[in-house]
Amino acid sequence: MMNPSGNSVMLACDHGYFMGPTRKLENPRETIKPLVPYADALAVTRGVLRSSVDPTWNVPILLRVSGGSSILQQDLSDEGLTVSMADAVRLNVCAVAISIFVGTAHEKQTLLNLAKLVDDGQEVGMPVMAITAVGKELEKRDARYLGLACRLAAEIGANMVKTYYCEDFSRVVEGCPVPLVVAGGPKLNTEADVFNLAHDAMGAGAKGVDMGRNIWQNDHPVAMIKAIRAIVHEGASAKEASDIFAASAAGKITV
Ligand code: R5P
């Protein structure tokens, strides 16, 4: 899942497991297909992998294996494991991903889910990504909280952590002894906001992104992922990424 640059642009398309047919991911195959050539890994659920990912696409799969709550619940943290390790192996995925909800009523349950997944993964050599989920409480995304959640994930044995970017993100990175990638979160106001987020996260020590809505909810998703790749793999600035986006969206960059 890691590019030779040492970093990764993971394309997150697993939102349906709790959001249903969310905007621009109503038909997962249509959304994913044009973006696959630019993704170092594709984050999906078992159902989308089976139904909407063509085996010939040849992209590493990061399989979402936790769930159990939907957006109809006020508290999204009541999750369990939704896929066995045997099926993850059978589906030939490269890693499995699970949310933990630190500081919620289901903190212990989700941390023990992670511990079980790491144990099961150890049996078969399957890497585990922990996701420091915040549910609907987006305001939780600060360095103190995310630093705590990422560290807990690493201590329990996650091989990699996905978290959110925040102010003082280098504190989160420094306190986490395994690689971190950042999610994009809900769609930001401008493309420049997304490029700044990715650039600042990389500058603070992230190993890449696992980004969804800010790519595929954009009117020019391929241009977005190309620009993000330039930041993650080539160290492009946010301004250079904006230029790549504009040129690609205008059809001036076709590869
Ligand atoms: C939630 O469904 C998942 O963890 C997403 O994969 C994660 O939030 C990244 O997607 P986005 O960039 O849209 O936040």
Image (cartoon, rainbow, N blue to C red):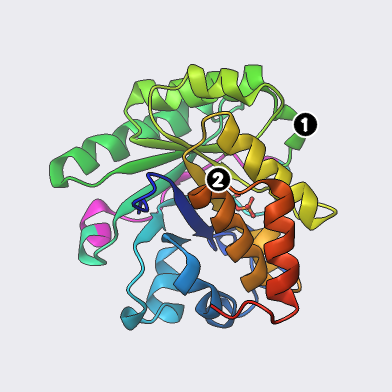
Q: Is residue 136 visible?
A: yes
Q: Residue at x 37, y 53 (%)?
A: 3
- Residue 148 position within the rendered picture, expressed as x and y whole percent measured from the top left: 54, 18
Q: What residue is disc 2 on?
A: 235
Q: Residue at x 60, y 27 (%)?
A: 105
The label shown at residue 139 is 1
Left or right for 208, reference 21: left
The label shown at residue 60 is none
Q: Nearer the viewer, residue 90 or 127?
A: 127
- Is residue 85 magenta-colored? yes
**What is the tally of numbered marks visible in this picture?**
2
Q: Residues within 10 Å of mark 1 (few under 14, many from 20)?
A: few
Q: Amino acid at mark 1?
A: Glu
Quarter of the figure that contains the N terminus? bottom left
Magenta part of the chain: 75-88
Q: Nearer the viewer, residue 6 or 182?
A: 6
Q: Are the two marked residues, 2 and 1, in contact with CB atoms closer than 8 angstroms?
A: no
Left or right for 134, reference 62: right
- Residue 87 position within the rendered picture, expressed as x and y whole percent measured from the top left: 25, 61
Q: Residues within 10 Å of mark 2 (few under 14, many from 20)?
A: some
Left or right for 3, reference 79: left
- Is residue 13 magenta-colored? no
